[in-house]
Image (cartoon, rainbow, N blue to C red):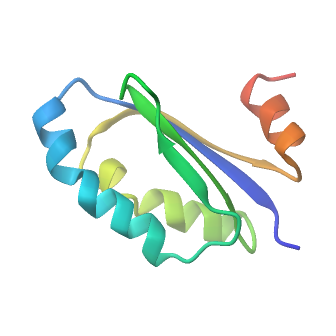
Amino acid sequence: MSPRFAYVYFMKDDPERVRAAVAEHVEHWHALHLDGYLGGPFEDRSGGLIIFDAEGEERAGRAVSSDPFLVGGLIEAYWALPGSTETGLICSLFSI
């Protein structure tokens, strides 16, 4: 079983550019065909959370670093955290 990762990101305050990049961002993540993929924006659209399985940190890093939001300079802050389970991811996110 591949390790699970969480990618948490917060957008810059540039709604027009973000809206223009949404389709490319969604297509990017779907085209990766990552097992365990689950993701979407926060309700207030300030950012989002993507959870996925990857063969290792290098593969996860490539998935994140090629995200059109990140490449396009639309992300203010982000974290890509490993965790073997959902509980491990939550603990990583909150530094528990």
- The residue positioned 17% from the left and 29% from the top of the image is 14
Which picture quadrant has residue 91?
Answer: top right
Q: Is residue 58 above or below residue 80?
A: below
Residue 24 screen position, x and y as percent: 27, 63
The number of discs equals 0
Residue 18 screen position, x and y as percent: 21, 41
- The residue positioned 18% from the left and 43% from the top of the image is 19
Q: Residue furthest front?
A: 43
Residue 45 screen position, x and y as percent: 36, 29
Quarter holding the N terminus? bottom right
Of residue 61 and residue 86, the one placed in the foreground of this image is 86
Quarter holding the C terminus? top right
- The residue positioned 32% from the left and 49% from the top of the image is 69
Residue 57 screen position, x and y as percent: 71, 63
Q: Residue furthest left?
A: 16
Q: Is residue 90 above or below residue 52?
A: above
- The residue positioned 46% from the left and 30% from the top of the image is 42
Residue 18 horizontal side relative to residue 57, left or right: left
Residue 21 horizontal side relative to residue 38, left or right: left
Q: Is residue 25 above or below residue 96?
A: below
Residue 43 horizontal side relative to residue 15, left or right: right
